[in-house]
Amino acid sequence: MAESRCGACCADCARRSAVRCGGCAAMKRPYWGGVCAVKSCCERRGLAHCGLCGDFPCAAVSALGTEQGLDPAPRLQACRDRARFDRLEFRALAREEFGAALALAERVFLQYEAPGYSEQGVRNFRRALRDPVYVRQLRVFAAFDGRDVAGMLATRDGGGHVALFFVGAAYQRIGVGRALFGMALRAHPEGMTVNAAPFAVGFYHRLGFADTGAETVTDGIRYTPMQYRPAAAAGGAL
């Protein structure tokens, strides 16, 4: 995710630490001095970033950096992604709201994970979503785009185990999963475990989870056991 007004990804900047740059949203003037027209425009309009502007993409933000040979397309897409993320509502769900979140979990599972599972695994996963005993164990966090569920994370075992974690295709790679995990971690700061599906292993690693065993198959469901320890992950993905 970008951290600047214009969509530039500050985390990718090699000079950020050297010049002690806190990002343009946190400074009065750019670290190089002078005035940035895009930064000034956002602040004059009271906007966190250009993606929230009714005139986006304007000539100023589209041209920024092009004289230095930089492609504006990644920055502009980052602004669009941030605007989509900013309109989402994140909250814990009451039990009567679980249905929509579980429906999203099933849709995303069938789209991305089911192709790598046996018929038995797919059947057992879908059966669990309809099992009232299993569902009663869950605490569910979700991101809403209006009335639509954009992503969901469910924990069990008192919050210590990630049971379900799915983000809709249209909302992936804009920070939804990271935000949901942050909510779950604040509710259970001691850390948590997960049985990561093959499709999600890389994502869990980026969050700071570490493998605790080899990939396993149980009742047709493939997974890699992992654990997140806050002390071990300090300074990492979150």
Image (cartoon, helix red, strand yellow):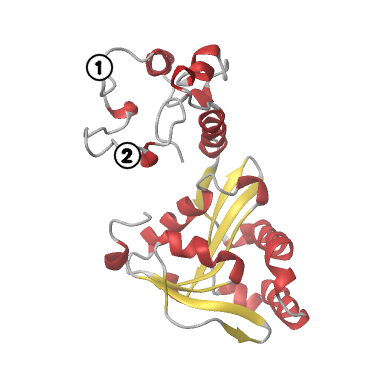
Q: Quadrant of residue 152?
A: bottom right
Q: Is residue 112 left or right of residue 18?
A: right
Q: Nearer the viewer, residue 183 or 203?
A: 203
Q: Quadrant of residue 25?
A: top left
Residue 85, label in figure:
none
The amino acid at mark 1 is: Gly
Q: Which mark is residue 14?
A: 2
Q: Would you say the residues marked 2 and 1 are in contact, meaning their CB atoms lie under 8 Å apart?
A: no
Q: Residue at x 72, y 70 (%)?
A: 114
Q: Nearer the viewer, residue 218 or 155?
A: 218
The residue beneath circle 1 is 33
Q: Residue at x 53, y 67 (%)?
A: 201
- The answer to whether 7 is drawn above or below residue 205 in the figure is above
Residues packed near mark 2 inside 10 Å, few (<14), some (14 to 19) or many (20 plus): few
Q: Quadrant of residue 167 in the image? A: bottom right
The reply, left or right, for residue 99 in relation to residue 64 is right
Q: Quadrant of the C terminus?
A: bottom left
Residue 211 appears at what percent x and percent y?
Answer: 43, 76
Q: Please, what secondary structure does the residue beneath circle 2 have?
A: loop
Q: Which callout, 2 or 1, points at the residue further toward the start of the chain?
A: 2
Q: What percent of the width, then of the height, locates residue 35?
A: 32, 12
Q: Is residue 230 left or right of residue 89?
A: left
Q: Nearer the viewer, mark 2 or mark 1?
A: 2
Give SS at disc 1.
loop
